[in-house]
Image: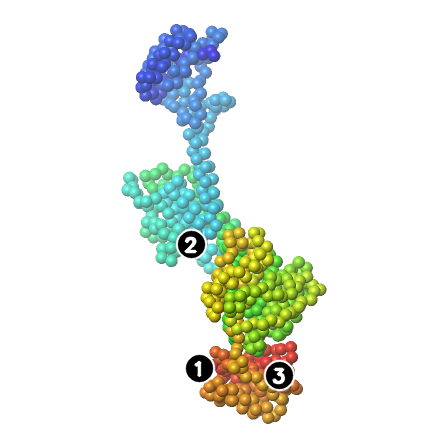
């Protein structure tokens, strides 16, 4: 290709150009190139002298010869400076040395007052490559900082992200104040506006060259020991700045009085534009403030930094607002789930209980699975486990309604199949797509029998005392909510020492295995656990539940899990006394004699007086209204329990008898002397019971 030389006009004078380092090998290469290049002899003498000059600019070695036409290029055409390189001073700026034209090189390179290289239009001041590079740095910083703030999922992470993103890149120190307490959603805060110092961050202390001081910041996040409060005075300087929303410099008139009010007495800020006060505004209201600080020996903030502070404050405030809303939703979900499930399990006679509940994920702590244990008359207990379709807030709400319905039906002492039938009707009233599975079982510790009815739920597993685990054969039935189906109940033996395990399908079914494979794995796991404790000792209930949950793999948590384990201890026949009494006038005295004989047989003679008095009062009330034989049963467990049943459905009520009344004091005596007492309505009447402590 042909090389074209450029005249010496328009070159920068030697004093205005940075001197290139001496390079002997470069000088030899340039000399060799000058000899071998055609037309080298035609170069101007001044250019040849510069070519051989070891201190010349490296760009001089690219001097070109005239073109094919023999014409020289326009000597007044400026040579453009490379992109991204700051403009160099021209001859006029360098003292006028060198033989160039009157147009300085700085104009061609984009200096203020020059022309645009492509359009020829005048450039605005401060629009050179250096200014563009500063603007690009700000944009990149804001993008990176907002991404770091957005990664936070809770309040502390967002505030920490703001501090870590700004120190030391944007500021030397930062203070973040938030409202105390933070308002949520549409809540209207009551009382004075109080700001609490949530977090501070700073560069480690260094000696200040200008003798300035920074606020005594403590980089700690413990609000209990280091929190500082600031009550915003209505109509004060700080209130005006917060109402204005826009960040302001510390030397602005609005901030001169606002910063001392916020920081408190004894804290100072650097003078000039080395502090920015930025209000944090959420979706509906100001939720705090941030103070950005720079040391006196560092460059002061610029006007464009106010825009950066505004972007940081806006993203942080919106993130905090979103986090507070999410925290409130999570709190509501946890409270809903906690109230839907039993807070504690009862301790019925003859059975021990343990339970577990696992949500589908930590981010979705609500679901439609539930379990329950409901004490029934006659020392019986109802065991319930169910699963509503889905694991959302709606599923949890439906689950709560079905659980409440099941508790009400259990209080009526209905058979298990009747309970499921009424639950099915209730689910249809809630909606056409309200589907659920449920298993309802009633355990009688005196008869050592259990009655089970199933509505589309996985069958229970019974772990015998010897270590054998069997899947109970219970008619599966249709899910609740289908409608128009019949449910069937079966009665099975429940030997003492056996453990019944009720669970939801999340324990045995996942994407990696079908439900029957999971049930078989559960049966094998129970049998293996029972072998560890030997044939004569059943495994502890709590440890058994934990061991069952350990069978879940990393891919087995597709649904929430409810687990209810019942250990059948039963009540021995020797600890039960049962009689039928005719509704006659002599029945109360006979009931007293029978109770006394039972207490003597059990060695509880110290309770004779109390038991005879209470039995006489309860039996008298039953005989007065009953038309069929009255039942009297005494149970000796950890307490002495007395149950009197009759065929009258009306429940007795405790009332205060007047001085002229002949009756109405029997239940008052029961309430004063008994440890506990109650009355339960049955399908055939009612049962009135009371309990007494014994040594």
Using the image as rendered, state which of residue 317 and residue 265 is in the foreground: 317
* Disc 2 to disc 3: CB gap under 8 Å: no
Residue at 61% across / 80% down in the picture?
686
Considering only order in the chain, which callout, 2 or 1, is on the residue closer to the N terminus? 2
- Give the residue furthest to the right: 484
Using the image as rendered, state which of residue 496 and residue 438 is in the foreground: 496
Q: CA distance from mark 3 to mark 1?
A: 30 Å
Q: Which residue is mark 1?
A: 695
Q: CA distance from mark 2 to mark 3?
A: 67 Å
Up the image or down, 357 lies above or below 256; here it is below
With 368 as the anchor, is 86 left or right in this view? left
Q: Which residue is mark 3?
A: 646
Residue at 30% across / 42% down in the picture?
206
Using the image as rendered, state which of residue 333 and residue 421 is in the foreground: 421
Considering only order in the chain, which callout, 3 or 2, is on the residue closer to the N terminus? 2
Residue at 49% across / 7% down in the picture?
69
Q: Which mark is residue 195?
A: 2
On-image quarter of the C terminus = bottom left
Q: Which mark is residue 41?
A: none
Using the image as rendered, state which of residue 325 and residue 283 is in the foreground: 325
* Disc 1 to disc 2: CB gap under 8 Å: no
Residue at 41% across / 49% down in the picture?
176
With 460 as the anchor, is 114 left or right in this view? left
- The picture places residue 588, in percent across and down from the top left corner, at 57, 90
Q: Label 1: state its secondary structure.
A: loop
- The picture places residue 674, in percent across and down from the top left corner, at 50, 82
């Amino acid at each position: 290709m042909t090389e074209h030389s450029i005249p010496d006009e328009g070159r920068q004078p030697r004093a205005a150009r940075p001197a290139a380092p001496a390079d002997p090998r470069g000088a030899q290469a340039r000399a060799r190139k000058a000899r071998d290049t055609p037309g080298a002899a035609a170069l101007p003498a001044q250019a040849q002298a510069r070519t051989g000059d070891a201190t010349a600019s490296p760009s001089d070695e690219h001097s070109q010869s005239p073109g094919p036409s023999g014409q020289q290029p326009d000597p007044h055409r400026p040579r453009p400076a490379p992109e991204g390189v700051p403009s160099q001073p021209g001859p006029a700026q360098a003292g006028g040395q060198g033989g160039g034209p009157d147009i300085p090189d700085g104009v061609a390179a984009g200096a203020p007052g020059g022309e645009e290289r492509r359009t020829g239009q005048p450039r605005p001041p401060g629009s050179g490559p250096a200014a563009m590079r500063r603007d690009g740095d700000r944009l990149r910083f804001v993008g990176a900082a907002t991404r770091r703030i957005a990664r936070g999922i809770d309040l502390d992470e967002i505030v920490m992200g703001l501090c870590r993103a700004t120190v030391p890149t944007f500021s030397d120190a930062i203070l973040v104040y938030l409202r105390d307490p933070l308002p949520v959603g549409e809540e209207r805060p009551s009382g004075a506006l109080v700001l609490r110092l949530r977090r501070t961050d700073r560069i480690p202390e260094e000696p200040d060259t200008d003798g300035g001081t920074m606020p005594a910041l403590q980089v700690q996040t413990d609000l209990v020991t280091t929190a500082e409060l600031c009550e915003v005075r209505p109509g004060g300087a700080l209130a005006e700045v917060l109402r204005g929303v826009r960040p302001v410099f510390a030397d602005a008139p609005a901030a001169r009085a606002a910063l001392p009010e916020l920081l408190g007495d004894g804290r100072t800020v650097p003078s000039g534009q080395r502090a920015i006060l930025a209000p944090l505004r959420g979706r509906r209201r100001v939720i705090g403030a941030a103070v950005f600080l720079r040391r006196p020996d560092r460059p002061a903030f610029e006007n464009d930094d106010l825009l950066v502070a505004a972007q940081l404050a806006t993203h942080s405030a919106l993130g905090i607002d979103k986090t507070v809303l999410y925290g409130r939703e999570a709190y509501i979900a946890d409270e809903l789930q906690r109230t839907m499930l039993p807070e504690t399990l009862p301790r019925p006679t003859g059975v021990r209980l343990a339970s577990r509940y696992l949500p589908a994920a930590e981010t979705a702590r609500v679901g439609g699975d539930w379990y329950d244990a409901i004490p029934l008359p006659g020392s019986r207990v109802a065991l319930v486990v169910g699963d509503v379709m889905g694991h959302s807030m709606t599923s949890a709400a439906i689950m709560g309604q079905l659980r409440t319905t099941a508790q009400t039906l259990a209080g009526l002492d209905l058979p298990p199949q009747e309970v499921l039938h009424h639950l099915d009707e209730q689910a249809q009233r809630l909606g056409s797509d309200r589907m659920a599975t449920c298993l309802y079982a009633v355990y009688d510790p005196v008869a050592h029998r259990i009655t089970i009815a199933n509505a589309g739920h996985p069958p229970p597993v019974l772990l015998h005392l010897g270590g054998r685990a069997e899947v109970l054969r219970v008619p599966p039935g249709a899910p609740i909510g289908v409608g128009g189906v019949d449910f069937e109940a079966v009665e099975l033996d429940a030997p003492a020492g056996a453990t019944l395990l009720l669970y939801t399908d999340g324990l045995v079914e996942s994407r990696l295995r079908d439900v029957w494979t999971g049930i078989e794995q559960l049966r094998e796991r129970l049998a293996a656990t029972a072998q560890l404790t030997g044939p004569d000792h059943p495994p502890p209930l709590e440890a058994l539940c934990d061991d069952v949950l350990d069978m879940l793999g990393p891919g087995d948590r597709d649904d929430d899990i409810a687990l209810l384990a019942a250990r059948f201890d039963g009540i021995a026949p020797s600890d039960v006394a049962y009689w039928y009494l005719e509704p006659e006038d002599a029945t109360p005295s006979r009931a007293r004699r029978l109770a006394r004989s039972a207490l003597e047989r059990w060695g509880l003679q110290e309770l004779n007086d109390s038991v005879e008095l209470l039995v006489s009062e309860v039996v008298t009330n039953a005989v007065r209204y009953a038309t069929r034989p009255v039942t009297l049963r005494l149970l000796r467990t950890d307490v002495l329990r007395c149950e009197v049943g009759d065929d009258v459905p009306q429940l007795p009520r405790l009332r205060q008898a007047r001085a002229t009344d002949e009756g109405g004091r029997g239940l008052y005596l029961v309430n004063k002397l008994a440890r506990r007492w109650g009355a339960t309505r049955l399908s055939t009447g009612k049962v009135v019971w009371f309990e007494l402590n014994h040594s």
